[in-house]
Amino acid sequence: MRVISFCADGIERAADLGFYSWLDDQDADIVCLQGIEAQEHLLPNEPYFPIAYNPYFFDNQEATNGVAIYCRELPKAIMTGLGFTDFDHEARYIQADFEHISFGSLLAPLASSDDQLSIDRKHQFFYQLHEHLSKIKHKRREFIISGCFYIAHQPRDVQLAEQHHQQLGFTDKERGWLDKMLIDLGYVDAFRAAISDDDEFTWWPDGQRGENGWRVDFQIASEGLRKKVEYGSILTTKQFSNHAPLIVDYDYEINAEDKLPIY
């Protein structure tokens, strides 16, 4: 099973840069997109609705944020939002449920250093996400939450770690949210389960590859998938946005049976 996560920073621009042509050759089972920045009903069929996939979008009227998920097999159900009153209208989460596994596409808020309200809201979001992950941990199914967290976890995940210590996206408090997910709750950073190399980045805030790289895009998997991770990579040979696609292969087969209504 191959899962791809990609923060597009505008899916139409990414399409113009060749994202969908690249995707056609990837044989992915699940594709989680963030930063759509478009409304589904205004997108033409090609290339945004690939014939090989069942596509589902969650957008808003402002065409900000926006997430989508492409499923090769038909899911049992699609869920939009996480029940976070202050955030669900911002189109930050969509989930596809199959028989024994669920896939989420998530876009966390990006805070600004000169806006304390945005910083507080980001922490509020991760507090609620932690509570949600704590609850679903006890469900009898596996989960893979893919997306852009705008947080780097360890010094090796930031190209200029010493210079950026305590900068937004790499503060002790923000990194602590990932500690709570990966250590306290036992979720798995799937990419790190496969790849331990330094200098592996998914985001360049200024758009210049090779300078100021951060690894802020993750696939967070439930504990039962820890030993199922086979391969991980970040596409850096092509550029579709300031983020690079994250690719993870799992020794797991999706079983989509008994379709249920979208809720």
Image (cartoon, rainbow, N blue to C red):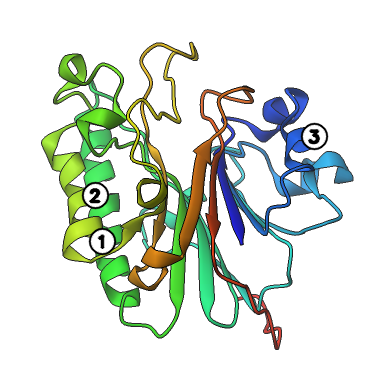
**Label 1 SS:** helix
Q: Earlier in the sequence, mark 1 or mark 2?
A: 1
Residue at horizontal 69 percent and vertical 85 percent from the top: 257
- Mark 3, other Cα within 10 Å: few <14 / some 14–19 / many ≥20: few
Q: Quadrant of residue 244?
A: top right
Do residues under tags 1 and 2 come within 8 Å of each other at their CB atoms?
Answer: no
Mark sitting earlier along the chain (3/1): 3
Considering the image in quadrants, where does the C terminus appear?
bottom right
User: In screen coordinates, is 99 left or right of 180?
Assistant: right
Label of residue 142 in the image:
none
Residue ID for mark 2:
178
Residue labelled with disc 3: 21
Residue at point 31%, 75% (across, down) = 137
Where residue 81 appears, as percent x and y from the top left, is 48, 62
Query: On the image, which quarter does residue 17 sit in?
Result: top right
Residue 231, placed above or below residue 243: below
